[in-house]
Image (tube, grey):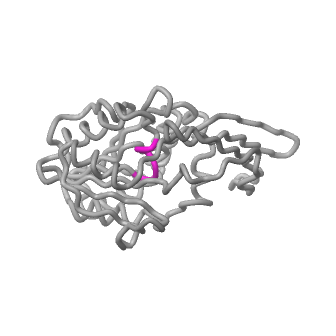
Amino acid sequence: MKTSNGSKGWDEYAAFYDWENQRTVGRRDIAFWRGFADGVGGRSLELGTGTGRVLVPLSRARHAKAPNRQRVFGIDLSEAMLDRARRRLTRARLPARFARGDIRALPYRSSSFSAVMAPYGIIQSLTSDADLDAALAEAARVLKKGGRLAIDLVPDLPAWSEYSRHQSLKGRRSNGAVISLVESVRQDRRRRLTIFDQEFTERRGRTKVVRRFSLTFRTLPVPEMAARIERAGFRMDAALGDYDGRPWDLRAEVWILVARKR
């Protein structure tokens, strides 16, 4: 993750990220990202690659088609997240490359990618206009002319009701440990921030470990986000309302913006 404020909490979240995402978004976005990357061709960059949830299946698909060509790259600021991505890629024997870095200052040459992907809320970890504009400008810089950008947003977080200490999830890990998530939501509506206070408890036998941290997201309305993308040097291609490509509307459960570098 990438900002002075929005980056906080992600190292602590790494141990629970895959467990929670299996129970929320799961794999329902993977086919979309695979199709997006394959449709563009060339080299793809994933912003906020995390534990490799998206990067690994994309790399597997690309490697099957062209095993001798490096096609998939990822970047994330959280070393704890990237440690898990490394292990995932090693187990899968895949060649994807990733870097620890800031999406506001990408460590790649200009015009070096055909596609830039920002899955499931990573752009919302940018908690100021300046951070968002910097990240969009960097995405434009590293894309070739005509290269494509896709951004997936967690829908309408500012509309969430505030609540305190609600048990959101409970389940087992593959090692038999029982995990529960107690969550609180706070809103800073003036700054368009939604703050999730997380308390994960993991029990295994007589051992109990509790981890507490907060994650902060900033959400702009789709028309405003689209305008910012265009100001960064893109032409909007589509606003989608699901992973099957249906158009976006105010009731959509998914917000995906797709654009092309001018």
Question: What residue appears at the point 44 percent right and 65 percent down from the top-left corner?
Answer: 250
What residue occupies the far front of the structure in this picture?
190
Q: Is residue 65 rendered to the left or right of residue 156?
A: left
Q: How many marks?
A: 0
What residue occupies the far top of the structure in this picture?
4
- The relative height of residue 131 versus residue 226 in the rendered view (above or below) is above
Question: What residue appears at the point 45 percent right and 35 percent down from the top-left corner?
Answer: 127
- Residue 68 spot, x, y in % from top left: 22, 53
Residue numbers of the magenta segment: 119-124
Q: Is residue 124 rendered to the left or right of residue 227?
A: right
- The relative height of residue 216 versus residue 253 in the rendered view (above or below) is above
Question: What residue appears at the point 44 percent right and 63 percent down from the top-left corner?
Answer: 29
- Residue 255 spot, x, y in % from top left: 41, 60
Does the magenta segment cover residue 153? no
Question: What residue appears at the point 17 percent right and 50 percent down from the top-left corner?
Answer: 261
What residue occupies the far right of the structure in this picture?
206
Quadrant showing the N terminus: top left
- Residue 221 spot, x, y in % from top left: 41, 52
- Residue 218 spot, x, y in % from top left: 47, 42
